[in-house]
């Protein structure tokens, strides 16, 4: 049995199950990857979640997206997406505008400043990803991607898709 996670978290007893060990391994791995990405983005003044939102809006093009569409596409769910988008707007990286036909609809679009920032970050992020996954060759990366997809599918069929809104 690989005791690496047990050593990292200083756990002295065995895990209750392989599923628990896998779950904790995923959580620990995400924490390490996310911290590395946060450190890579810090000099540019944004967080990984802000970077994710900017990438989503870049992909949406000039049409932009409403808040809920941004929330649905985020990798990690955030409790206050309105505040996330407000911070990006205050930084001049996105703009909000009301719909012409339906004034209730607020659309978010990336600005030229946001596009420039993402352009600067494309190589930074790619280098970070390459460094983080350097231990895996292409075949093992593809296997990892496939396995993670299967786990997500199984988890979502058991509990439903991750909700963009807070439960409870």
Image (tube, rainbow, N blue to C red):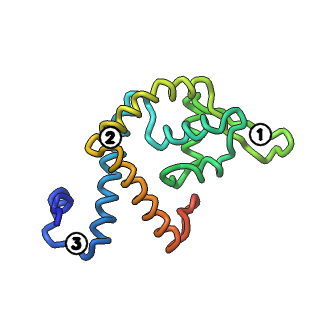
| Among the two numbered marks 1 and 3 on one chain, the one whose residue lies closer to the N terminus | 3
* Residue pictured at 57% horizontal, 24% vertical: 113
Left or right: where 94 falls relative to 101: left
Snapshot quadrant of residue 87: top right
Q: Categorize mark 2 by other alpha carbons within 10 Å: few (<14), some (14-19), many (20+).
A: some
Q: CA distance from mark 2 to mark 1?
A: 37 Å
Mark 3 in CB contact with mark 2 (< 8 angstroms): no
Crowd band around label 3 with a 10 angstrom C-alpha radius: few (<14), some (14–19), many (20+): few
Is 141 above or below relative to 13? above
Tell which circle, 2 or 1, labels the residue nearer the N-terminal end. Answer: 2
Residue, disc 1: 98
Q: Residues within 10 Å of mark 1 (few under 14, many from 20)?
A: few
**Element class at badge 2:** helix
Q: Position of residue 126 (x, y in %)?
A: 40, 33
**Which secondary structure, mark 3?**
loop
Q: Residue furthest bottom?
A: 16
Q: Residue at x 66, y 33 (%)?
A: 95
Q: Are marks 2 and 1 in contact (CB under 8 Å)?
A: no
- Badge number at residue 15: 3
Residue at x-position 69% and y-position 46%: 66
Report whether 157 appears left or right of 24: right
Residue 85, above or below 167: above
Tell which tag, 2 or 1, sits nearer the viewer.
2
| Mark 1–mark 3 distance (CA, rounded to whole Å) | 52 Å
Whether label 1 touches label 3, CB < 8 Å: no
Name the quarter where the N terminus is drawn.
bottom left
| Residue 166 picture location, percent across and down | 55, 62
User: Which residue position is annotated with label 2?
Assistant: 36
Q: Quadrant of residue 59?
A: top right
> What is the x, y in percent for residue 70?
61, 47
């Amino acid at each position: 049995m690989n005791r690496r996670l047990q050593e990292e978290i200083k756990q002295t007893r065995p895990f209750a199950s392989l599923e628990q060990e896998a779950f904790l391994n995923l959580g620990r791995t995400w924490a390490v990857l996310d911290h590395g990405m946060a450190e890579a983005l810090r000099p540019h003044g944004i967080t990984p979640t802000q970077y994710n939102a900017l990438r989503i809006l870049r992909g949406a093009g000039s049409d932009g997206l409403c808040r809920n569409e941004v929330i649905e596409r985020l990798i990690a769910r955030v409790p206050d997406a309105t505040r996330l988008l407000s911070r990006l707007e205050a930084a001049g990286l996105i703009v909000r505008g009301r719909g012409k036909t339906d004034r209730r609809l607020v659309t978010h679009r990336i600005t030229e400043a946001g596009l420039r920032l993402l352009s600067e970050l494309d190589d930074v992020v790619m280098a970070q990803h390459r460094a983080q996954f350097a231990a895996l060759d292409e075949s093992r990366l593809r296997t990892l991607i496939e396995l993670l997809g299967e786990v997500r599918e199984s988890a979502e069929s058991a509990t439903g898709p991750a909700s963009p809104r807070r439960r409870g």
